[in-house]
Structures are given as structure tokens and as C-alpha cells.
Amino acid sequence: MGKVVDTSDADFDVVTKSDNWVLVDFWAPWCGPCKMIAPVLKQISEEREITIAKVNTDVNPLSSGRFGVRGIPALILFNNGTVVDRVSGALPKPAMDSWLDRHMA
């Protein structure tokens, strides 16, 4: 259904120019909670028509700064290139599904 892609500052327009749902995951390799939600995000990409765009904040500081990311993991949901909502922290799968259902229904 959906897919998981690595996104950088240079190609962030895959998010802002998309006509579809995109969930941006701002993460870093040293972040424990980021590692915890990675399998959940993969599962969501397999269950929904959504692109998961992973942005490593260590090597892509412009995108995280542009969207005011203060802590990671930070998840920002886009639809048609526009920010719909954001959450911070590692949500368990049921909470993430509920959050996405509120917006994607």
C-alpha cells in the first residue's frame, strides 16, 4: 500500500509537493524512542495509503528547523503538501492508529 522513504533537506519536496498523505518521521540514529517506533511506522506503511518519509535530523538540520522540531521522534502529518497535525514522542501503535484515523478518515 504505502511506502517508507529516506528523505533529506535536498529532496524534502517529495513531502511538500506530494498529492497524498505523508507522515514525516524526524529521527536520529542515537535516539532510543526513534528506534522503538520504526517497526510501527513500517507496519503503518503496509496497512495504509501513506508515505512514511524518514528525516535523520543529525544530517538534515534544515528540514527539522523549518518545521520547529524541538525533540525527537517528531511526527508531522501532511496531506497535499500541507501540515495537518504533529505529535512528539514514541506513540504505541494503537495511539498512532487513532491519531491517523482522526485525520485520514
Image (cartoon, rainbow, N blue to C red):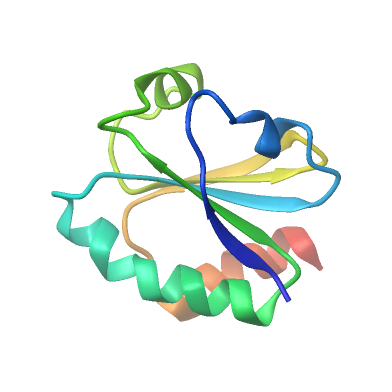
Q: Residue at x 16, y 59 (%)?
A: 32
Q: Quadrant of residue 58?
A: top left
Quadrant for the N terminus in the image? bottom right
Residue 73 horizontal side relative to residue 2, left or right: left
Q: Residue at x 36, y 67 (%)?
A: 38
Q: Residue at x 78, y 33 (%)?
A: 17
Percent across and percent down for residue 27 are 32, 46
Which of 12/47 is in front?
Answer: 12
Which of 50/76 is in front?
Answer: 50
Determine whether 63 is above or below 87 in the image: above
Determine whether 57 is above or below 63 in the image: below
Q: Residue at x 69, y 69 (%)?
A: 2
Determine whether 69 is above or below 62 in the image: below
The number of callouts visible is 0
Percent across and percent down for residue 9 are 49, 25
Q: Quadrant of residue 3?
A: bottom right
Residue 82 horizontal side relative to residue 73, left or right: right
Percent across and percent down for residue 59 are 30, 29
Quadrant for the C terminus in the image? bottom right
Percent across and percent down for residue 43 are 51, 79
Which of 38/103 is in front?
Answer: 38
Residue 84 horizontal side relative to residue 76, left or right: right
Determine whether 57 is above or below 52 in the image: above
